[in-house]
Image (cartoon, coloured by chain):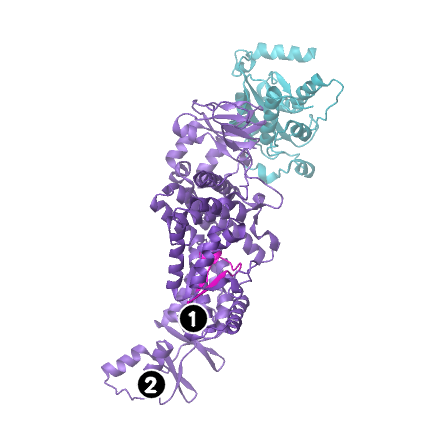
Amino acid sequence: MVLKTIIKATDRWTHRDGEFGFMFEPYTGEECVSLDCEMTSLDPQSAELVSIGAVKVRGSKVITSDRLDIKLQRPESLTGDSIKIHRIRGIDLHGGEVLGDALQDLLYFIGNRPILGYYINFDIAVLNRHIRPRFGFSLPNKVIELSHLYQHKIQQTNPELQPDLHFEKIAGKLGVPIMGRHTAVGDAITTGLMYVRLLQGKIPS
Amino acid sequence: MADEFDTQHPPFNLLTPEQQTKLKSSLDIAYFDKDELILAAGQPSEYVYIILKGAVAETDPTVKETDEEHQGLIGHYAQDDLFGAISIINGASRYNFNALEETISYLIPKAYFQALLEANQDFASFFHNSLAEKTKLLNTRRQQDMGMDASHFMLAQVDQSCMREALVLDNGTSIREATAAMRERRVDCLLVQRGSQYGMVTRTDLLNAVVLNQAPVETNIAEIAHYQLLTVPAGDFLFNALILMTRHQIQRVVVFDGPHLKGIVELTDVLSYFSSQSHVIGLQIERAETLEELGAAARGMDQLVSSLVSQGVKIRFAMDLLAALNGRIIGKVFSHILPAHLHNKVCLLVMGSEGRGEQVLKTDQDNALILADDLEWPLEERQKVLDQFTQTLVDFGYPLCDGKIMVSNPEWVMTESEWTKRLGEWTASVNGRGLMNLAIFVDGHPVAGDKSMFTRTRDWLFQHLSGKDVFYSYFGRPMLNFGTPLTIFGGIKDSSHGIDIKKGGIFPIVHGARLMALEQRIKATNTFTRLEALAEKGALEKEFAANLAEALALFSFLRLKQQLKVLAGQSEAESSNHVLVQELNKLDRDLLREALHLVKEFKSRMSYRYHLER
C-alpha cells in the first residue's frame, strides 16, 4: 500500500508536465468510466489482453454512445481454454489495433475519471503491465470496485449477510439485464448499469 | 451490449441499414428509480425513450387525484415500448411520464431523432399517422417480408383445375353444327377427330372459312382444322404450357395422357392461375354441371384462403372474394336441388357471418328460406328437399350450425307474412334468444330465388323499428357482455391460453355496426361497408370509422391465421378464436393493443349513446 502510494507520487512528479499530465489532475466532474477487459487467462502476470471495453457513466445514465470497444491482435497465448471462456476466436481479432495505440486511446478516453469495474484491480494490473513499459507510469485513477460497493450497500441494511458476489447474481438481484456477457463492452455497460442502480435505487435485501 | 437493441421492430425497421447502425451507436441507457418522474408535462423532451426493462405510466397531471387510483392515466408503457417521440415533435410533453417500477431505458438523443425524421419519410410518417395509415404502412412491410409464395405457382401442374374439357366432334360435322355446339358449350375452340388424329378448329378458323373463303356452312369442319397440335403431357408443369404458348404465340395447348386426349389448356386459364387461384375456382363453380364437380370446387377453397393469406392479400378483399364464391356455390346448390318451378317462389338467405360476407373459412352454415305466401309445397316433400340441401352443404365442407339456424330446421323456413310476424315478436322480446335471432336475420343476404321477398321483409323491419329507442338499448346490450382484454394500465391482458379475439374484439365492432346500421336503415350487411356508410351518414366520424374497420381487419387477420393453424393441425381446435399474445411479434402486438383500445372506446360511446348500461 505504502509502495503503491510512493510509486503514484513519483509518477505524478515525473509526468506532471508530460503528454499525459491530465491523468494526474484531481477529478472534479461527476462521471466515471466503466471498464472491462477480456483476457486470455486469470493470472495477472501472464494474461494477455484480448479486448478492452469502456463506457462513460454520468449521473443516472450510461452513455453508451460514448464508448470504447477495442479488439486487439491475437496474442500468442490465445488458447483453446480462453476461447471457451470468452467465445472469442482468433479470427475475431483480426484487424484489431496495435496494443500501443489501443492503450493510448484508452488513456485519453479515461482521463482522470475514476475507473469502475467488477474485480477491476485484476484488469488494472494487466493494463499496467502494458502501460508502464510504454508510457512510464501506472494508471493513477481512483478505483470503484462494484462488488465491494454492492457488499457494502447490502451490509448497511443487514450486516450479517454475506452476499453472493457472482456477476450474474448481482445483476439478477439488482434487476439489471445482462448486456452481451463476455464481450468487454457488454460487461462494461452492465457494470455501469449496476453502479447506477446501486447509487440511485433502493437496495434489495 | 447496446448492440442488442433490436431494430427489427417497427418503426426502426423502416430505417435504412446505415441509419440503423448509426442509431445503435448513438444510444444511451438510463436508469430510473421507482416512481421517478422521467418526463414532466410541459417540459420539452431531450430523448426518445425505448424501455429496455420496467414499466412507465403516462398520466394527465391536470386530473386531480381522487379515490380512484388510476384517474388521469393515459397510457402504460412496457418493455420495447417507445415514448417521448410525440413530445419532441410537438415541442413539449402533454403528460407526465413516471416510472411505475425500476426502469432501464434506451435513449435516442433528440437531435439524432429529429435528423432521422428529416431523412426518412416512412419513419417520420409512422409517428404522424393514425392507426389506419400505420397498418397500411406495416402491411406493405409484411408483404415484403413474407415474399410472394411463388413456389406454389411455379410447381403447379397441368391437371383438372386449370384444364378445360375439350369439345370433340366427329369428322363430317358441318360448320353450322359445330358453331351451334360451341355456342351451347360456351367454348371457343373444338377438336375434330379424323381417324386417330385430332385437329383443332377455333372461332377464328370458322370465321375465316365462312367469311374470307366463302365456304358454305355445310362444309365438313375436318377440312378447315389444323392438325399440327402443340401438346403437353398431363401432369407437366403448368409453367411449361405457358412457355410453349409464349414461344409459338398460340393460345391453346392440348393435353394428352399417353395416347388419350385429356383436355385443353387455354392461355387465359394459365394466366389467371398464375395471378391467383381464385379465378380457377370461379371457373370451376361456373362450369360445374353436377354436384360432385361443385363439391370439388368448394373443397378447394380452404387452400385458396391459405395461398391468399401467404400472398399478403388484404383480408377485406379476401373476404369479399370468398363471399362471392360462397354465394355462387350456395346459389348453384340451390338451383340443383330445389325443383325448378319453385325457384321464383322462394328466397334463400345466407345469414350471420356468411351474410355479412365475413366468413373466410367455412365455419358454419347459417341460412333461411322465405316462401311466397301463395306457394303450395307439401310439408313432407319440402322437409326432404331442404334436408338434402343442408346435407349437400355439409358434404361440401360447410359444417352444421350449432344453433340449428339452417333451412333443414322448419323454424327458419316461413312464408313472407309469417316472417314479418315472427320478426315483430322478436323485436318485442327482451330475452336473448329472440334478439340473437334478430341479429342473425339483420345480417341476412339473399343469394337465390326471388330477392324482392327479402327486400320487402327487411324494409318492413326498418319501418317497424323506427323510433323504438328502447329496442336498440336492449339490442345493443350484448356488446358489453364480454370485457375488452386490456389491463387497467392499458396493456393487453395476457393469459396462458391467449385472448379470445372473437369475443373481445370482433363481436363488439360487428354488433355495434349492426345496431347502428339497423337504426340508420343501411341495407349493406358487410361490417366494413356498414362502417363506411355510417361515416357517410355522419353517424360516426370518418376517421373513427376507418380506424374501427382497420381494427376489425386486424382482428380478422389474426383470427384467420389461428384458424389456418387449427386447419393444418398445428393447434387445438378449441383455440381457433384464441390469439396467444406472446407468440405475436412486436408489430402485431402493438397494433392489437391499439385496436383493442379502439374497441373499448367504441363500446363506451355506444353505451352512452344507446344507454346500454342499466
Mark number displayed over residue A67? none
Q: Is residue B365 magenta?
A: yes
Q: Amino acid at mark 1?
A: Leu
Give the percent coordinates (x, y) of residue B564: 54, 56
* Chain at numbered mark 2: B
The purple one among the chains is B
First reached walking from the N terminus: tag 1 or tag 2: 2
Q: Amino acid at mark 2?
A: Glu
* Chain at numbered mark 1: B
The answer, for residue B357, to whether it is visible in the render is no
Label 1–label 2 contact, CB within 8 A: no
The cyan one among the chains is A
Looking at the rendered structure, whether the residues under marks 1 and 2 are on a common chain is answered as yes
Mark 1 → mark 2, Cα distance in angstroms:
42 Å
Q: Which residue is mark 2?
A: B177
Q: Nearer the viewer, residue A97 or B391?
A: B391
Q: Which residue is mark 1?
A: B375
**Relative to B530, B563 lies left or right:** right
In the figure, residue B485 lies in which quadrant? top right
**Image quarter of the N terminus of chain B:** top right
Q: Nearer the viewer, mark 1 or mark 2?
A: 1
Mark 2 lies on a secondary structure that is helix
Mark 1 lies on a secondary structure that is loop
Give the percent coordinates (x, y) of residue B351: 47, 58
Q: Is residue A44 magenta?
A: no
In the figure, residue B341 lies in which quadrant? bottom left
Give the percent coordinates (x, y) of residue B184: 36, 79
Q: Residue at x 51, y 35 (%)?
A: B81
The residue range painted magenta reads B348-375
